[in-house]
Amino acid sequence: MVENLMRIPVTTSAGVFVAHYSAHGLARLEFPNGKAANEPPALQEPVPAQIQRWHKLTREALNVTLAGHTARELPPMDTSSGTPFQQRVWEALLEIQSGKTRSYSQVAAAIGQPKAARAVGAACGANPIPVLIPCHRVLAAHNRLGGFGGGLDWKRNLLAREGIVLEA
DNA sequence: TAAGTGCGTCGTT
DNA sequence: AACGACGCACTTA
């Protein structure tokens, strides 16, 4: 299913993300590169109308989420890169509302495998569409931060934007 | 509180 | 067989 991915920048209040689209939808979202400017997506190529529509949804959903609110509509997401288990986890993550959190073990229980907390953590780490698939809302037990592929600073930042404060 | 050890558990490589 | 964005039960400062 790995088709040509089209890369398009998304300007947000948190920097410029880069969205990757496959023929089935948003397939990947990269955090702002930090590196000086932004990635140089080939804007020369004409962007198919369908992808333009998806991208508009991505941009809006991303900005709304980053503002600490729940997006009304998400772009279609192509999660075919994941294993069946990972896809089940990502699906469960979509049910965590903005401003709420769950522990890795709670997510594990939610997919019917209460002992798979650690595997859930690995699946979160493999999440190709952070922010929109809110892996940042998954914490370790006792409201501890846990890990984050994009760096813990991002996790703290995203949680703060949703008004979530972690007790020391 | 904080930090460290050990072990059970489970999906992925 | 080895390795983790885990969790729990411990010790030890």
Image (cartoon, coloured by chain):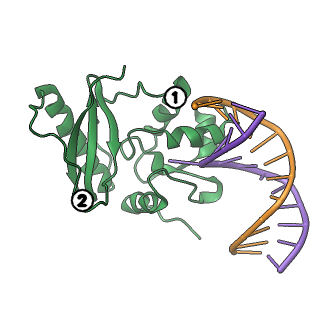
Chain colours: A green, B orange, C purple
- Image coords of residue A145 (percent x, y): 56, 59
**Dot 1: element:** helix
Residue positioned 35% across, 27% down in the render = A78
Say what amino acid the circle numbered 1 marks.
Arg
- Image coords of residue A36 (percent x, y): 25, 62
Asked if residue A32 is positioned above or below residue A111 in the image, the reply reads: below
Return the residue at label 2.
A13
Asked if residue A58 is positioned above or below residue A69 in the image, the reply reads: above
User: Residue A157 has which mark?
Assistant: none
- Image coords of residue A123 (percent x, y): 54, 37
Residue A73 in view here: no
Judge if badges 1 and 2 mark residues of a common chain: yes
Say what amino acid the circle numbered 2 marks.
Ser
Return the residue at label 1.
A88
Chain for disc number 1: A
What is the residue that sits farthest to the top in this orientation?
A: A1
Q: Is residue A16 left or right of residue A44?
A: right
Residue positioned 15% across, 26% down in the render = A50
Quadrant in the rendering for residue A119: top right
Quadrant of image for the N terminus of chain A: top left
- Image coords of residue A47 (percent x, y): 12, 31
Quadrant in the rendering for residue A5: top left
For label 1, the crowd category at 10 Å Cα-Cα, with few meaning under 14, some 14 to 19 and many 20 or more, is some
